[in-house]
Amino acid sequence: MKNLLSLIGALTLFVAIPTSAAAQQPSDAVDQFRAALAAGKVDVINDILAEDVLIFEGSGVERSLAEYRSHHLPSDIKFSQHVTFELLERETHNAGELAVVTSRYKVSGTYNEKAIDLTMNETITAKKLDSSAWQIILIHWSN
């Protein structure tokens, strides 16, 4: 029974977190990135973010996937695993091979023994790689 529950859990994660190849819309890439953060799926994050991704958060900036992996990715994963992100609104502005997805989330939960209750603004620019895949090239977070 325990093995069956483990298998069901693993299959649920597999279904819930598609690979970046399935990102047929720019908003799919955003949702996959957010789901991968919450699940700690670094391999999916590596696929969905461009090598030269630019990430603005507060007054800081990270100028590549490698820099993000070595600095804030572990804490972003930990944070995403302890809070919930409720999508309040989203707009997608598609301009051919580039798209901008703006989202607002209500973020709540407890992180580092502190209650979290805030509204987060997220602007993500994605680039179309081929006929069906999108990759994130720029992220800007603020609250």
Image: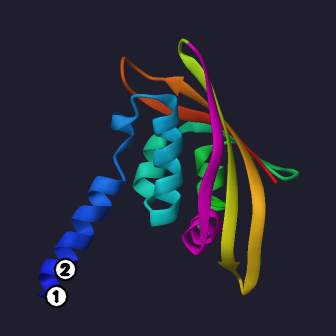
| Boundaries of the magenta span | 75-95
Q: Is residue 116 left or right of residue 88?
A: right
Q: Are marks 2 and 1 in contact (CB under 8 Å)?
A: yes
Q: How many numbered marks are there?
A: 2
Q: Is residue 48 above or below residue 42?
A: above
Say which residue appears at 56% left-offset and 35% top-offset. 136
* Residue 82 locus on image (x, y percent): 59, 75
Q: Quadrant of residue 21?
A: top left
Q: Quadrant of residue 77?
A: bottom right
Q: Quadrant of residue 1?
A: bottom left
Residue furthest to the top: 96
Determine whether the residue tagged by mark 2 lies in a helix, strand or loop. helix
Seen from the viewer's position, the closer of residues 36 and 121 is 121
Q: Amino acid at mark 1?
A: Lys
Determine whether the residue tagged by mark 1 lies in a helix, strand or loop. helix
Say which residue appears at 69% left-offset and 78% top-offset. 111
Seen from the viewer's position, the closer of residues 20 and 13 is 13
